[in-house]
Structures are given as structure tokens and as C-alpha cells.
Image (cartoon, coloured by chain):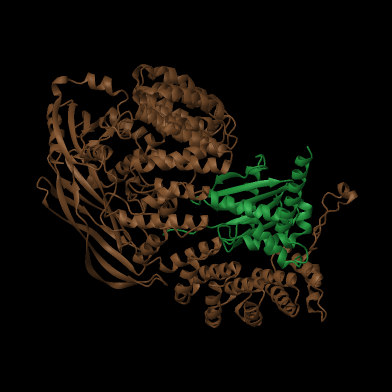
Amino acid sequence: MAQPMLKKDDDRDDEVDYHPFFGIEKGAVLQEARVFNDPQIDPRRCSQVITKVLYILNQGDTLTQIEGTEVFFSVTKLFQSKDPGLRRMMYLMIKELSPSAGEVIMVTSSLMKDMNSKTDMYRANAIRVLSRIIDGTILAQIERYLKQAIVDKNPVVASAALVSGIHLLQTSPEVVKRWSNEVQEAVQSRASLVQFHALALLYQIRQHDRLAVTKLVTSLTKGSVRSPLAQCLLIRYASQVIRESGANQAGERPHFDYLESCLRHKAEMVILEAARAITELSGVTSRELTPAITVLQLFLSSSKPVLRFAAVRTLNKVAMTHPLAVTNCNIDMESLISDSNRSIATLAITTLLKTGNESSVDRLMKQITNFMADIADEFKIVVVDAIRSLCLKFPLKYRSLMNFLSNILREEGGFEYKKAIVDSIVTLIRDIPEAKEIGLFHLCEFIEDCEFTYLSTQILHLMGNEGPRTSDPSKYIRYVYNRVILENATVRAAAVSTLAKFGALVDSLKPRIFVLLRRCLFDSDDEVRDRATLYLKVLGGEAVVGETEKETNEFLFGSFDIPLVNLEASLKNYEPSETPFDISSVPREVRSQPLAEKKAAGKKPTGPAGPTSGPVVSAIDAYEKSLSSIPEFAAFGKLFKSSAPVELTEAETEYAVSVVKHIYDGHVILQFNCSNTIPEQLLENVTVLIDASEAEDFAEVYTKPLRSLPYDSPGQTFVAFEKPDGVPAVGKFSNILKFIVKEVDPASGEVEEDGVEDEYQLEELEVTYADYMLKVPVSNFRNAWEGMDPESERVDEYGLGARESLAEAVNAVISILGMHPCEGTEVVANNSRSHTCLLSGVFIGNVKVLVRLSFGISGPKEVAMKLAVRSDDPDVSDRIHEVVASG
Amino acid sequence: MATLPSVKNILVLDSEGKRVAVKYYTDDWPSVSSKLAFEKSVFTKTMKINARNEADIVMFDGHIVIFKFIQDLHFFVTGGDDENELILASVLQGFFDAVGTILRNNVEKRTALENLDLIYLCLDEVVDGGMILETDASVIADKVSSASGLEAMAPFSEQTLSQAFAVAREHFARSLLK
């Protein structure tokens, strides 16, 4: 067994499946295990049997408790044997059986004896086994030996003790913390792995003491660490220190020189670790990035796939935040598109799509087309996402990108992939007006041969909404009606609705649509027939719903704004009686999801995915829906803009509150998202008390309290303000959360009757001009700029004072204005002395605004800016200047 | 909090994706069936890749898997997706080379199964509960060989060294004769 068998059997080909464990069976092996009890131990045979038991366990079989105990006891008998090979297998076996506390006592004394053996191998392994199976009381007995072992001259023993220390720190931290001195000594060990294990343990002992960690890092970065693994650890700890100090300190970062010096280390793993640490520094400057990017660029052309992958993955992440820093690698990156490792190729492509400029788009698309055919769907989805963001960045290129999307839409692919493509096309249709007709046309082609009912119905719905408003609606009818002839009932029903929308919105098509709808009256499916009948009657004027045409359309095609869960509940409660079911009695409040579920959904996919812009847009729609379902707010009109949530509490406090500002023409609604993080409490009647004394133009009109806020289940309370119509009023609000606290027994979930009123101070919030500005992209800034009245232009110059960098100044101005950067101009080239930034947006009152910013930076980092504004309304141009002047 | 480099599992599968020896260190895969499902998807994702000269890498479901094949054996090391790929690669290389030394470069399913006890010991010496214990193949092989009663013979790593000397000597002699 112990000796490798090099001789090959001649008849091996006849018995392909033969191997030493072929047909092995648990019962038989357990029988064999009786050999452990023999008075004369045969080490060789015993080892073989142990291997067999391990094999059975390793294949996924398990022992019952009785079987386990029996094997364990017989194995302990083998401590009598002096055979080292057998002993080694016994250690393995004991670990694998993970004995119960009662059983552990049987072996502790034998293992403790081994721990003090003269043989290093016994010592090391006995330590590892013991640390795995013992509890606190036995640990106290052996602590002394473990401390000695940490500084043992044999590295194997020292490592075993240190690794055991790391495991034991989880269960008995107070004991392990006492070993600090010995561990510190071991950090200076000459054996590289000992150094690594000692450093890991030392850090874990001290990790909650920030000062001690800083000291540790400062002393070790001076250069006593030799092991590459330990060096990697030290880099992680150093960047931890940088992260913690970085927030309150400008200028030179501590330990940056150390990280940079690690880029010249001879071990590749250290170089990679350091490069990655540098790219992940918060607010990393391009000067700091350059050396890291350079080493990663070298890795890109390595012959080792792992190295190429690591480099391209890191650069891909950098490209999300600093696309310009990565452009130098573009040539190396392009050669990776044909890499045999598809993960590398995909990452290379998505990086290129992020860093590419407008002129390289066409060339890239050509390369990607060749590549798409032979990668898996999950990678294709990543590419499609990247292409969508690219198209939003360079709207002028919509034609070639849209063509690409439609081409891949025609290829083979699974549902998720097709859905990603359709979603992308839909996003482009919505955000780039010029792309609408082409996009719709491609989608029409697609549903001609689409095997996914879900996608067909989604597209039909979209066509019903968008198609009638195109220049030539009639050309879509054929595609829609084909669905009625060819598809399953679900798609047919959707197609009937779409036809009806064309009929309702385009008068010239009405008679022809009626002909088609009448044919649907003979459909085999009742839903299809019902829909056709309803539309014919209502649109034909035979049945009257509502007084005006608008109300009729609202009835037929209005959005269904009642939560389905609530409708289901109400229908279940409804008892058949004289009074018909009244749909307006269904509550419209959305019941909040448990927090845990939301978190799971919010967890970002960890693949090499690019940022998607989809959810942002749909968030507004979702807000509008949920707000209009609250009757008090329904009269406020159309929602102009909803801000991103702003946290009003520190992280990890008792109550977490964030606010979303909803802007209407004449009103502002503050939506407070509250969540309760204390399991022992139930909050009731939650409101936010607002002091608006620093916001003169605002008058509070309505407060909607949150009736109950249980643990881990977020809810919302709203406060509405009135403000002068169309005026971008600004102001500061200070807020206090008011509520009634009731104690909850977390075990039983019972709530106490009596509650106590309490309040909780929240941070201030501000409504600024940026809240009145919608980020709306324009596809061609130059055309749009020249299309605006030059009379409306207002130009002025500003000094912005000393700034850290040009990029920082540009970002600051963009965020003050809250406008959409066009044509990728938000990115400032490395080391450039001047920069022009183009912004577009829509100001409240639907006033289109374009801004041209020219920045210049002088020697001592003084930034000057020229601001030119054009807008539909000269007053708004003036106002933009006021915003900048006051910001 | 800065984390320790850690290994989630080490797998040795045969050319059909069946287990030869596996070791899991975390509870990312709590049940036997989830472990087998993971092995199956790793195997199918990588089987067509030629990872015989250089270790290759694949990333999916939030894991990084580094793998290398030889004969009818497939070796895998899995880590989290924020792990340093090269650290995982060094673990794989250490384990892979140690197995090669132990099986005297005759690495295939049959010899591996015939020496399964040594493979298990090797796994035990590479990683302990997810912590990297040793990545130097010759040290691992020595630890395994000293444990398995083979110390009567020259340790593996020394033996390969002496072989190397023999080859060098031969080369030297030949160059002298020219």
C-alpha cells in the first residue's frame, strides 16, 4: 500500500473499472475494522482499513452515531502501536470522525503524550488534532505546551501551533490572546510559513485595537517580512490602516510607499496583491494608480492564464471608476479578446467597452461579433450589459450598437440572455429618442420568431405604448396581427390589447383595426375573445365607460396600480352576496417586505458584471406608482424627480432612516424609509417631526404616519410640503423621529400592551437646486447647443480656489448642478491642465438646460472655471449661475 | 476587516468528474448533494479546457476555481471571488507537485487510488481548516513520506535532487567528450 505500484497489469484494458476500492461496501469495511482490536496489531493492514473507511467517508457516505463511536474506540486502541505511518493515519481518522466530548477524553492523554514526543511529526500532528477536537477545559491543560510549540525551532511544529491558535481564537479568544509574546517572537522566524501564520494570528489577536494594528504594520513594513504569503497579508493590513486613517487626512497617505515598493517584489502574488490594494484605495489619484497599472499591464501578456485573468479582472474594476487610467492597456487588452480562456476574453471585452472612445466603437463591435458565437450565455449577458452602458455613453453610436444587439438577438440563446438583450434594446428606446423606431422594428422582427411567451408579451405591451406615437404606426400592425394568427393564447391576448391601443390612439387606423379585432371574436381562447369583445364595444362607442375619450382610454389601458397581493387577499375575503365586489375597496398600501429578503435581492451579482443603468430609471416609475396610490398625494400632479436615498442616521444605529425627496410642481414630499434593528422592540405611530424654519418657502401640508414598524421589516412615513408653483425653493430641514415603543419578547413574538413615547434625533436634510434638475442626456450636444437660442446664453467666470485635482473640481461642480455629463466628458485625462465638460438636464417646469464648463488649473492647484449656460428660459440660465455662485 | 487568504475546497476528480479525493473546508456547501452539484458544474465548465501545461482559472457563482489536469486526473482549488488568484494557484501547484513526487511522476487515477492514503495525507498537509499550511511541494512530500514509513529510503525531494545531479553529471561528461 505504501509503496507505489508501478507495474501495470496486462489485462487492465479488460477491466476498465477496476481499482482498489471497486465495489467497496460500508458494512464490510466496518467488519474489517475489527482488526484494530487484535492484540497483535498489524500496522500495514490497519492502515489499509483506515484508508478504506476514509474513502467511504470521502465519497459522501456517512457513519451512524453508533458506527462512528465503535470505529472511534477501536481506532484509539491503535495508540499502542509505534508505527509512524499508522499513527499518521490515526490522526487523520480522529479528525475526520470529529468525536463527541465524551469520546474526546479517551484520546486526550495519548495525544498530549504525543505533543511532548521527541518526534516532530508527532508533535505537530497531535497539536493539530487536539486543537480541532478539544473544549475550553482541556485547552487550559495544554495551553503551556502550545505556547512552547509556537516558538519551537522546528517550523512544522510552530506552524501547527500557530494555525491551531487561529482556529482556537474563534472559540477561546481569551486564552489565545495570552500568547501574544510568543506569537510576536514567531513573526521574526526565518521559516517563511511560520512567519505567515504568526502574522495572521498576531493581527487577529489585535484586530480590534486600531493603534496596535497601526504599530504592527509600521514596524513590519520596514522590511523584516520575507515570506511572500506573509507579505500579502501585510499588504492587506496596511491597506486596512490606510482605509481607517484616510477619511480624516489629506495629502500623502501613510504606507503608500510600502505598497508601491511591493510592486517591485519578486513574487508575483505580492505584486498582484499590492497592485490590487492600490487600485482599491478610496479616492486614488491617477499618479498613485500609474505604477500599479503598469505592472498589471505586464501581467496581461503573461503565458500563465491565472496571471492574465488576475490582471484583467483588476483592470476591469479600475475601468469602472478610472477609465482613462486603463486606456494605456487597450492594445494588450485587444489581443486578449481571442484568449482561449473565455473568462479572460469576456473581462477584456467589457473593459475595452468601458475605456473605449467613440472612434473605436465600430472596430470593437466587429471583434466582439466574432467572439460572441463561442462563449457561454452567462458571459454573453455580461457583454450585453456592457454594450448597453456604452450606448448610453455614446448615443451617437446607437446605430451600430443597435444593429449588433439585433444581430445577436437572432442567434441561438437561452431565456436569460434573450431577456438581457431585449431589456437593453428597451432601455435604448427609452433613453435615445432617435433609436426608438429602429429598436421597435428590431423587436418586431424578433417576436416573429420568439419562443419565449414572457418576452413576446412584454414586447407587445411596449409596442402598444410606443408604436402609435411613431411616424408610421401602420407598419407595425402586420407584426402584431401575425401573433394573433400564430401564437399561443397568452401571446394572442397580449396582441389583441396591442391592436386595440393602435386603434384607440390612431384614428386613421381605427376601421382597419376593427376588422382585425372582429376576426379575433372567433378565437378558441376565451380571454382572447373577451378582450376583443370589450375593445370592440368600448372603442366602437356601443358601451360607454366614462365621459371623455381620455377616461375611456384610461379605463382600457390605464396601469393596474393595485398590489396583486392585496387584491388576492381581498378577493379571498369577499363573500358572494348582493353587493358586488368593489375594486376601490382594496387597500393600496404596499405591505413592506422583510428586510432580510430585500438584502438578499440587493446583493450585487459577483460576476464580472458591469454597472447597469436599468434599475435607476425604473426606480422613478416605482416611486410614482407607490406615491400616486396614496390618495392625499394623488392631486399633486406628475412626479418630476425623486432623489436617491440619503441616509439620515449613522450606520448600525438602533433605527436606520433614509430620506427620498420627491419633487412635484407645487409640492415636495419627503419619504422617510425607516427600519427598526432591535428585535425586542415594536415601534408604532412613527412620524418625522420636521422643523422647517430654515426653509421659508415651504409649508407643511400633510403627514402620513407609519402605523407599525416591527423589527427587520422596513416601512415608510411621508411628510408633504407645499411650495410656490414651479419655483425651485431651497431650504434646510431638521428632523426628529417620533414614535411609541413597545417591548417585544423576541422568543415568543408577544407584544406588551403599553408603549412609551420616544423620539430619536435625525440628521438634517437639505433641498437644493440639484433636486430640481433632471439628468436627461442629449445624443448630440453640439447640435442641441446650436439649436438653442444664443440670446439665452449666460456666461461668467468663477474661481474655485485650491482643489486637490482637476477631476475633483469637475466632479464637485457636476454634483452641485445635478446634471447629466454628456459624451463621457466627466472624465478628466491624467495630468491635464484644462478640461471641458458638457452637461445636460431638464429643470423644473420642463426647461431644457445645457451647460458648457471650461476648467483650468494653475500651478498651486487653483482652479478657475468658465460657465456657459443655454436654456429655453433665460431666467433659468441666470438661476444656474446663482446655484454655482452660492455653491 | 482584512481577511486571511483561505481555501474553500480542494478537489481531485477523475476524467468523468467522479471523486478521487476531495476536501471541503467551509460550509458553503452544507450537504453532500450540494457538494456533488458543485463538483459537477466545476467539472463540466472546465473539462474542455486544456489545463495540462499551465494551471487555468474559471470564475462562477462567486467562487474562483484554479485547476490543472494530468492524465485522467483533474485537480481543483476553490477560493472566494475576492481572493488573490496567485495565492490559490500556489496552493494548487504545491499540492499538484507534491502528489507528483509521491506518485513518482506516475500521476493517474489508478496509482492515485492505489496510494490514496498518501493523497489524503497530502491534502491534510496543504491546508488545515481553510488555512494554507504549506505550499512548498518538496516540504509537503517530505512530511507525507516521513509519515508513511518511507524514511528508510531517501526522501522524495532529495531523491529527485540526486537524480538531477546524475543528469547534470552526464551532460557534463558528454560535453567534455566532444
Residue A748 screen position, x and y as percent: 42, 72
Q: Is residue A428 left or right of residue A110?
A: left
Displayed quadrant of residue A859: top left
> Dividing the image into 4 quarters, which one contains the N terminus of chain A?
bottom right
Q: Residue furthest right?
A: A11
Residue in the image at 67% along x and 64% along y: B143
Which chain appears brown?
A: A
Displayed quadrant of residue A395: top left
Residue A882 screen position, x and y as percent: 12, 36
> Dividing the image into 4 quarters, which one contains the C terminus of chain A?
top left
Total count of labels: 0
The answer to whether one can see residue A161 in this image is yes
Q: Is residue B175 left or right of residue A768?
A: right
Q: Is residue A842 left or right of residue B16?
A: left
Residue A308 screen position, x and y as percent: 53, 40
Task: Find chain B in the image and tell me its colour.
Answer: green
- A331, A52: nearer the viewer: A331
Q: Is residue A666 above or below residue A330?
A: below
- A148, A168: nearer the viewer: A148
The answer to whether one can see residue A638 in this image is no
Q: Is residue B81 left or right of residue A287?
A: right
Q: Is residue A312 above or below residue A187?
A: above
- B103, A725: nearer the viewer: B103
Q: Is residue A680 above or below residue A246?
A: below
Residue A381 screen position, x and y as percent: 50, 36
- A87, A48: nearer the viewer: A87
Residue in the image at 47% along x and 35% along y: A350
Q: Is residue A256 above or below residue A144?
A: above
